[in-house]
Amino acid sequence: MSQNFTEVTSVSLLCDSVATLKFRYCKIIHMNNIGKNMFDIGYMDMLAEGDSFLHRLNPGAKLITTMAFIITVVSFDKYSVSALTPFFVYPLVLIAVGGLPAGYLLKKILFVSPFAVFIGIFNPLIDREVIFHLGSIGISGGWISFMSVIMRFALTVSSALILVALTGFNTVCESLLKFGVPKPFIVQLMFFNRYMLIFTDEAGRVVRARSLRSFSKGAAGLGIFASLAGHLLLRTIDRAERIYRAMCCRGFDGRIHIIRKTKTGYREIVFVFGWIILFVLMRYYNLSLKLGGLVTGMSR
Amino acid sequence: MSHHIIEAKELQYSYPDGTVGLAGVSFRISHGESVALVGENGAGKSTLLLHTNGCLFPSSGSLRIGDCLLSKKNLNTVRRTVGMVFQNPDDQLFMPTVFDDVAFGLLNLGIPENEIETKVMRSLETVGAGHLRKRPPYKLSQGEKRAVSIAVVLAMSPDILVMDEPTSSLDPKSRRRLIELLKTFKHTKIIATHDLDLALDICERTIVIHQGRITADGRTIEIFKDKELLDRSSLEMPLSMKNCRE
């Protein structure tokens, strides 16, 4: 949030002197754009309205396959890089068959990539033992494990994003419910999905109101930030109260009922078992190495 | 038809911070009446509406909804009788899709699942929103959200409809469509509004609230002609009536 304040204030300063920057100012101070970038679940839900073979599959089948994929990917040891490479076939096939926008998904992955970078960034400093040479350059174990972290991050995040883009956030939640995830947790997720955009809109209006009256003052101080955050919290509590009242008015008794009829056919079975067999194969046989060996052997 | 009646006797309510919401309100609304509740901001309109379906309980006085007195024991019956449309549809539409939202109340009432589809679609068709059934509520326009928030209430077949500022943040066309829709309902209606033209169109009776008290209760046309009363209540004569006078 403080970063947003800084952006807003710096752009406000420019606007005071350069009228042509008005467009950019408006573009930046709209915090709902930030909200859209961070939680663009609406667009993901729109993607989920597609009509490909993958869209029509039972959500449970897609959820099981994604879970199996994630578990397999994270089960590799920390120096695995070549063995992970074949796993990219899963997101690539799903993107191609499901007709998903690859560039958009890549942007989403890059947006959250700093988290993965921070997790692995110290590996090259801690683990300096050279474990192989690329020509004359020695590559340390730290760099290999860092690479492995990034690959695993890209694979797991992309598979989760693809699952939501092919199924829809709420349908994923409903499938989780069927697989025994506790209901309060699912209800929280669904409410998060429903109200996140409204919350970011509200936060955006508060930030805009501050920036319009801050003129050439610098970034918001701690006091102002605390006040804005406090106001947002109070508004959120008020809204939660109103939503709860609306629920009570319609007989809410602590349980949320949802009607969904889903079918499981041979297509789901083939999809789940086909992929799981492939994951197991890729887990126990390093296909990259075998393919490399085959190509090298042929060239000899 | 006593279940369509609302009767308040010396209703009083104070908020926890000491603000007086209602300071002795008495009225009786009988079957099929459409009543507008008007008054300045903070007059007590929303506080009164929140009493009608047991979101708030009076500090003193009594409120009779149909055959039963408002109490925690009768809460389910009261909420089954009174359907409330909230001011902000985003507060009222919280489920993943429009269909789920309309079905929410029905499932809580224990309606069998095989009847839900028919009832949901009937309600949505009544407000002209059948085509929105699969849409997530946050993707709807304000007018569509308002229509759906009325459908979620209609689905539960209430005897009394209570609406808080139904035309707020609607464009003129959506507002007109809503007015035409409300005219078709035979329910007992209580509509809290600042839109006096809407009140004039739909409600034959108006109750004016000022500082938690009823300052006037009578025929809408008569009340809106009383300039002094309107001034005292921070209201203005409806535009349609101004034109008539000019």
Image (tube, rainbow, N blue to C red):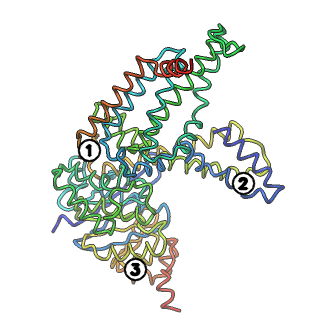
Horizontal side, residue A145 vs residue A67: left or right = right
Q: Position of residue B45 (x, y in %)?
A: 41, 63
**As rendered, which of A230 and A284 lies closer to the eye?**
A284
Mark 1 or 2: in front is 2
Which residue is pictured at 66% across the width and 15% down the height?
A124
Q: Position of residue B170 (x, y in %)?
A: 47, 68
**As rendered, which of A208 and A97 lies closer to the eye?**
A97
Question: Tag 1's secondary structure?
Answer: loop
Question: Tag 2's secondary structure?
Answer: helix
**As rendered, which of B77 and B208 lies closer to the eye?**
B77
Query: Which numbered tag is attached to residue A257?
Result: 1
Horizontal side, residue A7 vs residue B10: left or right = right
Quadrant of the rendering where the C terminus of chain A is positioned: top right
Q: Is residue B7 visible?
A: no
Question: Tag 3's secondary structure?
Answer: helix
Same chain under badges 2 and 3? The reply is no
Q: Position of residue A81 (x, y in %)?
A: 54, 20
Q: Position of residue A101 (x, y in %)?
A: 51, 47
List the residue tagged with mark 3.
Answer: B200
List the residue tagged with mark 2.
Answer: A24
The answer to which image quadrant residue A57 occupies is top left
Query: Which numbered tag is attached to residue A63?
Result: none
